Image (spheres, coloured by chain):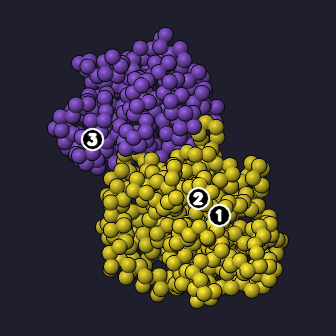
C-alpha cells in the first residue's frame, strides 16, 4: 500500500483540496510549483544551510539510559526540543519562507494555537525581512501571553480571532479569510500537515529531515537504519509526519501515533480524533475530525494547546484506517506525569505535547532489545505555567 | 424545466436574497421566505448554517452561530420547508458548506431537496474537480443545479471549464474577499464585470459579495443578469426583523 500522497492529493480516502474558488489560484500555484521549487539545487542548498547554521541541525539522537532502564527497553529521544525556537515547527517555517520568496510573495500569514508555530513563523519573517501577520484565537492570546510577546518582539502583528470558539480552529479560519482577501502578494504558512493539498505533503517533506537524520544517526549507534518503533504525538501531526516519513514504506518499523485523550476519551473533553472523529471536511481537507452528527465541527480539549485540534492530517487518517499506524491516546494526567518523570530521569523538561508520546511506556510494553525512537518535538519552557499549576510547584 | 433556468429567461435583472435558516429565531425560516416572496424578489438562497464558514465574513458567520445555537440542523431545515412549494414558486437554492451535506449523506440530501422542490445548490467548498468526479451524477439525478463561483482571479481557461460544467447561472464573486466586506465598486470591479461579459459565456452571471443598496445593485447588473444580497440583508434582519424586509427590498429595486 502507498502511504504517501498520490497525484490527486490523496492519502487513501483522505486529503484533497476542498476550498472555495477564491483560494483556488493560490493553492493551484503552490500545487504546480512546490515540488519543482523544492528540488531546485539552490533551494536545497539554502534550506540545508539554514537548518544547519540557524536552526542547529542535526539535532541529537539521544539514548535515554535511565528512562530505558525504567521501562526495560531501548529508548532514543530525537531532540527536536533543541531546535532554535524550541520545537520542530521551525523546520517547516524555514522551508515555507524560502518557498514564499521564490513564488514572489512578500506578505506572510499564519495561524497559531499555543503560539509555537506563530513564533517560528515570526522568526523566519524577521530573518527574511518579510511582513508577518499571525492569527491567534482570543482565548489563546490570554492563555499564552509570553508567546504573544515573543511574536511582537520579532516584529509580527498578532491578530485576535474573535469568531466562533476563539481558539486554533478559528485562528485557522481567519488566516484562510485573510488569504481570500489578499490573493496575490500573500503566502499562508500552515503550521501542520493539515489544510488543502499540497500543504500536508509539503509540510511533511519539510519535516522529513527528522527521520532522514534518525536513519543516519541510528546506523552509527545501532548499526542499522531502522528502529523497531517510531513514536510521536499527533495534534495536526507535523512532528509525527516528520519522524514517520522515511519509515512509512518499511513494514518492519512500527509506527505509533499518540493522541491527547484530555480528561478521558469519553469525558466529553478530549482531542483523540482517531477514536472520536468521523470522516469529513476541515480546513480544506477530507480527513477524520471531531464533529456533531449534523456535521458541525466541535471544540476539542487537551491540556496541551498543540494537540488541541479537532482534526488530524490526512496522512495520519490514512495510517489509522489502513492499520499501518498504531494509535494510542494518553490523558492529561498521564502526560503530565510522564513529563515530570523525564525531568527527573534525564534532566530534560519536555513540552506537554511531547510528554504524551513519553507516557505510552507505562502501558505499552516493548521487548528488551527493541529500539524505540520517540520524537521529543519540543521543550517545556513554554509550559512552565501549566506544570507549576498542575503540580503546585510554586 | 428547472425553475432556475426558467427564471433566467425572464427579461429583467434578477434580485436574489441570501439568508441564514433559523435566524434570527429558529422558526423564522418560513416567515422570512414568504415575506421575501411577497416583497417581489426573484430567487432565494437558503443558508444552511455551518460552524466554520470559511468564505464568509463576520455578519454571516455570526448569524450562522446564532442559528446553530437556536437548534438549526439539516434535518430541521428540511422539516421546516417541507411544504414550502404550497406557497412559494420562485427558484430556491440551498447554500451551505460541504461537511454537513456529507454527514447527512449526499444522495439522501439531494433526494430531500428534490422532494421539497429545491432547484439548486451552492457549496463553496465543493470544488469543480471533486464535484465532476464524485457527485455530478447524483445532483443531476435529482435535477439539482450546482452553482459554481468565479472571482476576479479566476483564469479565463477555468471560467470556461466552469461554464461548461454549469447549467443555470455562474455566481460571480465581485472582488477578492469574504462576504460582507466591500464598500461599493471601483473601476477594478467594473473592468472585471466587462471582461466576463465579453467572454460570452453560455450561462448568465449573477453577481454576489458587496451588493448592499440600489447603487451597487445597478452597478453589478449593468452587464450581469442579476445580483445576490446576503450580508446587508442579514444586517437589516438583525436590526429590524421580518417587518423590515419589504421596505429593504423596495430600497434596492424601487
Residue extending furthest toward the left: B198
Q: Which chain is purple?
A: B
User: Where is the C terminus of chain B found, in terms of image quarters?
Assistant: top left
Question: What mark, if any, has residue B161 been given in the picture?
Answer: 3
Q: How many marks?
A: 3
| Residue A7, image x, y percentages | 39, 56
How far apart in space, not on screen, are marks 3 and 2 (Cα)? 35 Å
Question: Mark 2 sits on what residue?
Answer: A319
Query: What residue sits 33% from the left and 68% below the top?
Result: A36
Query: What residue sits 40% from the left and 31% below the top?
Result: B137
Query: What residue sits 37% from the left and 71% below the top?
Result: A38
The answer to whether residue A133 of the structure is visible from this angle is no
Q: On the picture, is B144 further left or further right than A213? A: left
Question: Mark 1 sits on what residue?
Answer: A257
* Disc 3, SS: helix
Q: Which chain is yellow?
A: A
* Disc 1, SS: strand
Which mark is nearer the camera, 3 or 2?
2
For the residues bearing labels 3 and 2, Cβ distance under 8 angstroms: no
Residue nearer the viewer, A12 or A183: A12
Are marks 1 and 2 in one subunit? yes
For the residues bearing labels 1 and 2, Cβ distance under 8 angstroms: yes
The answer to whether residue A126 of the structure is visible from this angle is yes
Q: On the picture, is A155 further left or further right than A74? A: left
Amino acid at each position: 500500500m502507498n502511504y504517501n500522497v498520490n497525484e490527486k492529493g490523496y492519502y487513501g480516502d483522505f486529503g484533497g483540496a476542498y476550498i472555495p474558488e477564491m483560494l483556488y489560484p493560490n493553492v493551484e500555484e503552490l500545487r504546480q510549483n512546490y515540488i519543482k521549487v523544492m528540488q531546485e539545487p539552490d533551494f536545497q542548498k539554502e534550506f540545508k544551510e539554514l537548518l544547519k547554521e540557524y536552526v542547529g541541525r542535526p539535532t541529537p539522537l539521544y539514548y535515554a539510559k535511565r528512562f530505558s532502564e525504567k521501562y526495560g527497553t531501548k529508548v532514543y529521544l530525537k531532540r527536536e526540543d533543541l531546535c532554535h525556537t524550541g520545537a520542530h515547527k521551525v523546520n517547516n517555517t524555514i522551508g515555507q519562507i524560502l518557498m514564499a520568496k521564490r513564488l514572489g510573495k512578500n506578505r506572510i500569514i499564519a495561524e497559531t494555537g499555543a503560539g509555537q508555530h506563530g513564533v517560528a513563523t515570526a522568526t523566519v519573517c524577521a530573518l527574511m525581512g518579510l511582513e508577518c501577520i499571525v492569527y491567534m484565537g482570543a482565548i489563546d492570546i490570554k492563555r499564552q501571553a509570553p508567546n504573544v510577546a515573543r511574536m511582537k518582539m520579532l516584529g509580527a502583528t498578532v491578530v485576535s480571532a474573535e469568531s466562533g470558539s476563539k481558539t486554533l480552529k478559528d485562528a485557522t479560519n481567519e488566516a484562510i479569510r485573510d488569504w481570500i482577501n489578499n490573493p496575490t502578494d500573500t503566502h499562508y504558512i500552515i503550521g501542520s500537515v493539515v489544510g488543502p493539498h499540497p500543504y500536508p505533503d509539503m509540510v511533511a517533506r519539510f519535516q522529513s529531515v527528522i527521520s532522514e537524520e534518525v536513519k543516519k544517526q541510528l546506523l552509527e549507534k545501532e548499526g542499522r537504519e531502522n528502529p523497531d518503533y517510531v513514536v510521536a504525538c499527533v495534534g495536526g501531526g507535523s512532528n509525527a509526519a516528520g519522524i514517520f516519513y522515511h519509515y512509512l514504506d518499511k513494514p518492519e518499523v512500527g509506527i505509533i501515533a499518540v493522541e491527547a485523550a484530555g480528561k478521558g476519551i469519553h469525558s466529553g473533553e478530549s482531542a483523540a480524533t482517531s477514536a472520536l472523529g468521523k470522516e469529513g471536511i476541515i480546513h480544506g481537507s477530507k480527513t477524520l475530525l471531531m464533529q456533531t452528527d449534523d456535521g458541525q465541527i466541535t471544540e476539542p480539549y487537551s491540556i496541551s494547546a498543540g494537540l488541541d485540534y479537532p482534526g488530524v492530517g490526512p496522512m495520519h487518517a490514512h495510517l489509522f484506517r489502513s492499520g499501518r499506524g498504531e494509535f494510542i491516546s494518553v490523558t492529561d494526567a498521564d502526560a503530565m506525569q510522564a513529563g515530570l518523570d523525564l525531568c527527573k530521569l534525564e534532566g530534560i523538561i519536555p513540552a506537554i505535547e511531547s510528554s504524551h508520546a513519553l507516557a505510552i511506556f507505562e502501558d505499552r510494553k516493548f521487548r528488551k532489545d527493541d529500539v524505540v525512537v520517540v520524537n521529543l518535538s519540543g521543550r517545556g519552557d513554554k509550559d512552565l505555567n501549566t506544570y507549576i499549576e498542575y503540580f503546585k510547584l510554586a | 424545466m428547472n425553475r432556475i433556468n426558467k427564471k433566467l429567461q425572464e427579461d429583467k435583472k434578477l434580485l436574489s436574497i441570501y439568508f441564514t435558516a433559523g435566524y434570527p429565531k429558529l422558526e423564522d425560516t418560513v416567515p422570512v421566505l414568504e415575506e421575501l416572496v411577497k416583497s417581489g424578489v426573484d430567487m432565494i438562497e437558503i443558508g444552511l448554517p455551518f460552524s466554520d464558514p470559511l468564505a464568509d465574513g463576520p455578519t454571516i458567520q455570526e448569524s450562522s452561530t446564532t442559528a446553530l445555537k437556536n437548534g438549526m440542523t439539516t434535518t430541521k431545515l428540511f422539516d421546516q420547508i417541507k411544504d414550502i412549494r404550497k406557497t412559494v414558486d420562485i427558484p430556491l437554492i440551498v447554500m451551505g458548506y460541504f461537511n454537513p451535506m456529507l454527514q447527512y449523506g449526499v444522495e439522501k440530501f439531494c433526494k430531500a431537496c428534490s422532494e421539497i422542490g429545491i432547484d439548486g445548490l451552492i457549496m463553496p467548498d465543493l470544488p469543480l474537480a471533486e464535484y465532476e468526479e464524485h457527485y455530478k451524477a447524483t445532483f443531476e439525478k435529482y435535477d439539482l443545479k450546482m452553482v459554481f463561483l468565479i472571482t476576479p482571479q479566476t483564469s479565463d481557461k477555468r471560467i470556461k471549464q466552469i461554464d461548461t460544467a454549469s447549467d443555470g447561472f455562474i455566481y460571480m464573486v465581485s472582488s477578492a474577499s469574504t462576504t460582507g466586506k466591500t464598500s461599493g465598486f471601483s473601476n477594478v470591479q467594473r473592468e472585471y464585470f466587462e471582461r466576463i461579459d465579453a467572454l460570452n459565456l453560455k450561462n448568465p452571471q449573477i453577481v454576489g459579495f458587496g451588493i448592499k443598496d440600489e447603487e451597487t445593485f445597478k452597478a453589478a447588473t449593468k452587464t450581469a443578469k442579476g445580483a445576490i444580497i446576503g450580508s446587508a440583508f442579514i444586517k437589516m434582519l438583525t436590526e429590524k426583523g421580518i417587518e423590515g424586509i419589504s421596505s429593504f427590498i423596495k430600497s434596492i429595486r424601487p
